Amino acid sequence: MSKPGIEDVGVYIPAGRQSNESRKAQFGIDDAFLEQKIGVRNAARKAASEDTSDLCLEAFRALTEKRAIDAGSISCVVVVTQNPDARLPHVSAILHGKLGLREDCACFDISLGCSGYVHGLSIILAFMEAHSLSTGLLFTADPYSKIVDPEDKNTSLLFGDAATVTLIGTNPVFHAGPFSFGTIGKEQMELSCPSNGRLSMNGHAIFNFAAKSVPIDLDRVLAKAGLDRDEVDRFLLHQGSKYIVDTIAKRAKLDSGKVPFDIAEYGNTVSSSIPILLEKQLAPAAGNIFVLSGFGVGLAYASAVLRRVL
Amino acid sequence: MSKPGIEDVGVYIPAGRQSNESRKAQFGIDDAFLEQKIGVRNAARKAASEDTSDLCLEAFRALTEKRAIDAGSISCVVVVTQNPDARLPHVSAILHGKLGLREDCACFDISLGCSGYVHGLSIILAFMEAHSLSTGLLFTADPYSKIVDPEDKNTSLLFGDAATVTLIGTNPVFHAGPFSFGTIGKEQMELSCPSNGRLSMNGHAIFNFAAKSVPIDLDRVLAKAGLDRDEVDRFLLHQGSKYIVDTIAKRAKLDSGKVPFDIAEYGNTVSSSIPILLEKQLAPAAGNIFVLSGFGVGLAYASAVLRRVL
């Protein structure tokens, strides 16, 4: 069996928006702060009736509008989230039931935040290769509107709701790897949320962590891949904020034209930010070599190289 | 690099106990029910001050009492839980900080219940092989005392708190595989817990699910491995209850002497039940071929063959 990789991506961004423009007075901020620091004018908000699994189902529906998917072919479902529908069961089991998947389909959720897509990609690919599975779905859905305090300037202007699904199969557009992983657990308290409480983020600490660690990790994954910066067509960085993406690009000496920033109309969607960007790179014109890098809760980061094979 | 496998297991069962004997009148049950149906006389209860990561640290401490572990050698930490310390971060990040692990150590949690050890084993082994990692830790810790309603006869007599850690390395006692996986997502509501609520279990539905699915899955994994029942030294079944373990053994035509039941003094410890049994099989006298089977939340099940290599 040929090596599995990324075949396609489906994206769902709910229609609801919180206008950050309308909150400038409340938080004592100006246009420069919104445009240059945060980079989010409107933050996507799911409907109150939508739960995490519903967002995933909409992402799957978006995928099926692009291509037919035979539910009977899917042998693995992985959901990356820290905001599941419930404490138990896992979201992947709910999706298994709602999508009517076959009984021998392996389902599990992974608890990770903004680095979760890159970690999740490495996990589902390794799992599928180890068990000779040919078709899998990797979902990301971490609707922070469930836990953000609307009065907290640090987080309520920044985070948006979304979900994605990545179709993993043996006729891929991209092969993934090498990967690089990192954790700085002693700083885990800088981005946290108690079981029944609200999200708390030390923005300064998270910024410093990412600005320091990600450029080093990009060098590491490029070296592992035997690639020079110039050979990479796009660097798809987690869309933490305008300022962090700009800062990483500058410190890592990346050509800013190769570093998309795209969240002004929906916000930082946690583990969905990278696959939302990736969906726009599926056509051959976008280039052949991509580097992904996610960073956040843990504190954790992960990077990967994607190479076009189709 | 040689193939990673199970090198050792560390177990922590908190000293606190809930006496089920003392609750017979409250629930209108007799000794026969406690002994033959549930099989739990005393259920382990963690101290109120102990959180999920603390249980994991105690399991790790138990492991280090058996053998020296170089923290600098650990390149992967996976925690199986649906009752983490917090919504975020993941427990593995907290452990990373408290154990002082190296920065390039990959950490993630997996959300699964009673089938979680078998799934987790397959995931960490696949991940470590894919990324050529030589030493990893697989934790299980799902303290249901956090979510059990003490007045619910279905669950409060049954579940106990515990944690385990399995040392994965390239000088193993056991190699694992083949594996078999299953999910019946349309029955997920039979064992559930809302984010801020209490555990709800339809005991009848869960029993019927396990009694039907697990014998079939045991046949499937034995066929995959090319093994006959007689060649297996022990079947380490998830210790759901005395009645379900007896029923599976009977329906699957297993020699009851090969099917340990061991939870009378601590209870059903969710994803920890199989590694607690496994720790007692590490010495060569226990035999050479083991079959593991976990089943529960999802509803999900998973089975695996272990073969002694040391």
Image (cartoon, coloured by chain):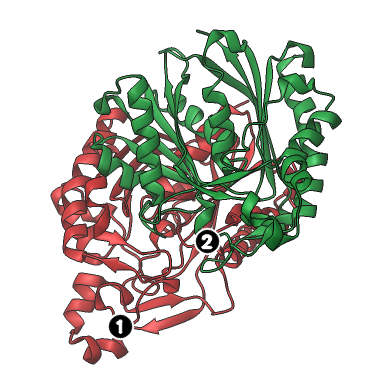
Chain colours: A green, B red
Q: Can residue A106 be seen? A: yes
For image coordinates 31% across by 58% down, the residue present is: B260
Kind of residue sitting beneath label 2: Pro
Q: Can residue B226 be seen? A: no
The vertical placement of A34 against B203, above or below, is above
| Residue B86 in which image quadrant | bottom right
In the picture, measured across the screen, residue A191 lies left or right of residue B86, that is right
For image coordinates 68% across by 42% down, the residue present is: A240
Task: Residue A241 in the image: state x and y as whole percent.
Answer: 70, 42
Q: Which residue is mark 2?
A: B84
- Which one is nearer the viewer's eye here, B137 or B288? B137
- Which one is nearer the viewer's eye here, B231 or A242? A242
Per the model, the C-alpha gap separating discs 2 and 1 is 23 Å
The vertical placement of A116 against B16, above or below, is above
Binning the other alpha carbons within 10 Å of mark 2 as few (below 14), some (14 to 19) or many (20 upward) gives many
Q: Secondary structure at mark 2?
A: loop
In the picture, measured across the screen, residue A249 lies left or right of residue A194, that is right
The vertical placement of A271 against B65, above or below, is above
For image coordinates 85% across by 31% down, the residue present is: A251
Give me the chain letter of mark 2: B
Q: Secondary structure at mark 1?
A: loop
Task: Residue A157 in the image: state x and y as whole percent.
Answer: 64, 52
For image coordinates 65% across by 43% down, the residue present is: A40
| Residue B192 in which image quadrant | bottom left
Kind of residue sitting beneath label 1: Glu
In the picture, measured across the screen, residue A105 lies left or right of residue A132, that is left
Task: Residue B310 in the image: state x and y as whole percent.
Answer: 53, 38
Q: Which residue is mark 1?
A: B151
Task: Residue B123 in the image: state x and y as whole percent.
Answer: 48, 38
Of callouts 2 and 1, the N-terminal one: 2
Give me the chain letter of mark 1: B
- Which one is nearer the viewer's eye here, B248 or A134? A134
